[in-house]
Each structure stands twice: as structure tokens, then as C-alpha cells.
Amino acid sequence: MRVGAAGAVVTCLLLAACGSDKKSTSTTAASATTAAASTTAAGSTAPSASTPAGSTPGTGATGASTPATGSTGAGSSTTAGGAAATNPNLAIPTDETNPNGYGQDPTNPSLYKGAGGFTIDTSKCPSDWNATGGISGDTIKLFTALPLSGPIASVGIYGQGMKSYFDYVNANGGIGGKKVQFDLNDNQYKPDLTKTIVDQALADGSYFASSGINGTPHNLAIWDEMNAECIPMMVTGSGAAQWGDVIGHPWTAPGGTFAYVAESRVQAEYLKKKYPNGAKVVTITINNDFGKQYLTGLKEGLKGSNIEVVGSEMHDPAAPNLDNEFTSASATNADVLILESSGAFCTQTMANLERSSWKPLFFLPNACGSTSIFQPLIDQGLTGKGAYIVQTSIAPNDPSVADTPFIKAYKEFLPTVKMDPANTAFAGGWQYAWATVEVLKIAASYNGGLNRANVALAARAMDQPLPLLLSGLSFKTFGTTDEYLYEGGQVKEYNVTDPKTPGTFTAVGDLLNFEGQLGTYDNCAQARTG
């Protein structure tokens, strides 16, 4: 079944970004939903979304928005930025019901049936597999691996936010009375160390699932093993296309981060509108699957325009700094610099740019919008003013969400565990953990109760509004047809009024939404076989 013309552009971007990591030979492809292009005037009330879309671990320094206007590419829809009027911003996801009778088949205990025809056959799991392994008494034991040290450590801060959110949920009744134990492990942003952490967790045998494991190469290093062991990987900490592989890797949940291909598309659409007469673009790109998917998506999004990518400086993930890459990039005198990296590399690039005579339009990646990225600049007497970013969420310190249940809980609880709610990376962790709790609550409502197989089903039936989501986006998955939580965003510019404090992000473009158009990872096979 082919995707419609309006969705073909985004599907082609997904195809380009797919790479060759998928091990499944299945070519079953779901039809991608296409949306007729529509616009909502900036500053007006956006159409209500039945299920708002996700955000990244790096929630913006602030989410303040100003009216913006503009058109979109084919197949997208645009809305104004701002708080989602229909989003209740709940502190804890609501308890779920199971009107469709999903879960364990009463006639075949090894078969689990979920939304949109998605099934799990546990007879294919190892002989010693236990559906409720990792749940002991009143405790659900989860683990993660993320950078708590090294140049990407500022990204890993969201893991501490996740842990604090689970503590908050535990203090408020837990998951059906069960408490979540969440163990943090430092992978130093090294895939081989992530593999070691997972090997140890599997050998230990006491963990129910993982959640929030950071990084594309790290998740690729473990997803075959985790799927072979039938251990759920919940809310994957990456926006790579592979996490839509519902057929080949059914135990790996969709990414909890804005899909890189969709983010690159939003960047490309903005640049095509801003530079109708053409422009030169240079990138500084981390040399791994994460960076390469960004770069490929950008190039595909710019095809057919007169905007040229004149250079891409690749950097080692373990590099101490990006001084050499920045020097090479600045030598191109490009009109636009796009950073496709993370962590301290974002801070370093902004510092280099602020001290340079070269002043291109500068795009940060979505993961680099938290105060943990900008505060080190302030400490150097710099600001980062004028940086652009594609965002999906309102920041926790935006006045429009100050009185919501989620933010009230966030600001009241964090000081009790000696954490500063002003560090917006913690809020990103709360969003990740909130989504994890949603999955656990959905699974608990299914036939057979809270177990690993039902978690795999539940991860593909998410539909509660994620707190802080921009109005007009959707946060949902559905069976075997919609595997990407985040499929839209809005370009914002970082403004500074007081150089001694973090600034605010202000909307400079319409929100673009490609909801449903990415479909699944098998769209790649579909596009290849045409």
C-alpha cells in the first residue's frame, strides 16, 4: 500500500534516514496517514488535537512564543505556538480502561493482541522468560543507561529528572500500589559501555524493562539482544527512524525524542521560506548514527531548492572540543550553520560563534534547549543570543503553564529531593518518566495485567496528552501503523534581555505537523519496493 502524495516527501526523508541497521526481512508496510495542508493564523487558537505530541529530554529554556505567520510544505499543517488549551497537563497520567479487550488471549496464553492488529507471541521468547520478571512484591524494577559524565553529560541530566518523577509517583500511590525502582547507569556516551550495562542487567535477571536509554548508537548496540530476550525497551531516548521497526523489533518502543527526520524537515522548510533566493549551509555533525540521520534528513528536505549544503564537518563523539570543526565551517562563510550534535558541544559551538566575526543563522538541535546548555555560556560572560531551535514543548518556566498540575507538582516536589526546578533538563526527565508511567498504566489495564508483553502492546497504544506539549501536536502511537510519537515542531529564536540569566525562546515560524506521515520503519521497505 503506497503513501499519498502529500505524505511522500516525509516518507522519502524517513527512507533516506533509515540506514542499514534493520535486521528484519519483513516488508509489510503500513499506510501513512496524510494531512491536507492547512494553516491556523499565528496567535489564534490552534485546532484541538485528540492526542498531543511528545517532547525531548531538553525542554527549552523558556517556551514563550510570539505570533508568527507562514506557509508550509505539502502534507503538513501549521498552527500557532503556545500552550495547548485542551491539554490538562496532568501531574500523573490517568488510570486506563480496556474497552477493546487488548492483552492476553484467553484461548492462547502465549498470544497478546493490541491496537491496530499488533500482536506479541511469547512462545518465541526464551524458555526461562517470565512475563512478570522484575516485578517483586510491590516493586517494579527498571534501569537506564545514559551519559552522566563526559562531554555529553549535560544531556544525561534528564535521567535524574526521571528518577525524581518516579519518586513523586511512588509518593502518590505508585502504579496500582506498586513503586518504581529506577536505577541510573553511566554509559559515558559509549555504545560499548551501554552494551556492558545491558548485559549485566540481563544477567542479573531482576529488571522488568529499561526506559529512557539515551542515544541512537547505544540503542542500536542493544536492541537485538533486548528483543531476543523479550525485555521491553520503553520510551527510547532517541529520535532515530529505527524505533519504528514494529515488525523486526517489537520489544523496542517508539522513541521518546522528537523524530530527527521530522526535525530536519522543519529546519529545511523554514530555511526555504527564509532564503527564497538561495543560501549556503554548513553543518557540524557528530560522527555516529544520531548525527548522520540529522544530516541525511536535512539534505533530503532541501532537495529541489536553491539552498546548498556546502560542507559537513564530522566530529568524534569523544572529541574534547569542536575548535577545528568550527574553524573549517567558518571558512566556508556559509549563511547558515546547523549543529547536529549534543551536550557540551552545543555550548562550545555557541561560544565559538559568539566570539567569531562570522555570524551565520545558527540552528541548535532540539536536544540542546535546556538551561544546562546555556548556563555555562552565562558563566563565561556569553549568552547564546540569536540561536534557532525546533521545539515541541513549552518550557516549565513559561507563565502560560505555571498553574497547571504538572508544573505545580514539578516545582513543589523537586526541592524536596534537593533538585532545582530551574534546571529545565529535569522537566524533560519528568516528561520521559510521565510517558513511561502512561505505558505502565495502559499495560496494567490489559488482560493479563502488568507484564512485559502487555508493556510492548501498550507502548503502541499511547494517546494521553503529554504535559507541556505545544498546541496542535499529537503524542500518540497506534499498533502497526503509527510508530513515531513526535512528528512536528516549531522554529524559535533564543532572546536574551538580562545577560546574567537564561533567556527565552520566541516563535519565528509556524508550527509544522506531519502527524501520521512517518508511519513505521517498514515504510523504508515499502518505498524501496515501490
Image (cartoon, rainbow, N blue to C red):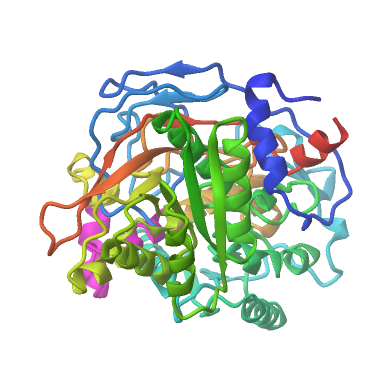
36 shown above or below 395: above
374 shown above or below 303: below
Magenta residue check for 119: no
Image quadrant of residue 479?
top right
Q: Would residue 33 be visible to someone looking at this image? A: no
Whole-percent x, y for residue 30 in the image: 75, 32
In terms of depth relative to the viewer, which is nearer, 370 or 131?
A: 370
Whole-percent x, y for residue 355 in the image: 27, 66
In terms of depth relative to the viewer, which is nearer, 276 or 295?
A: 276
Task: State the quadrant of the C terminus.
Answer: top right
| Residue at the image point whose x is 59% and y is 59% from the top | 290
| Residue at the image point whose x is 41% and y is 42% from the top | 392
| Residue at the image point whose x is 63% and y is 48% from the top | 296
> Position of 268 compared to 32: left or right?
left
Whole-percent x, y for residue 312 in the image: 56, 57
Tell me the magenta residue range. 408-431
Magenta residue check for 423: yes
Secondary structure that dominates the magenta span = helix
Q: Would residue 516 be visible to someone looking at this image? A: yes
| Residue at the image point whose x is 55% and y is 16% from the top | 36
Task: State the quadrant of the N terminus.
Answer: top right
Whole-percent x, y for residue 437 in the image: 48, 54
Image quadrant of residue 482?
top right
In terms of depth relative to the viewer, which is nearer, 175 or 310?
A: 310
In terms of depth relative to the viewer, which is nearer, 81 or 315?
A: 315
Image quadrant of residue 365?
bottom left
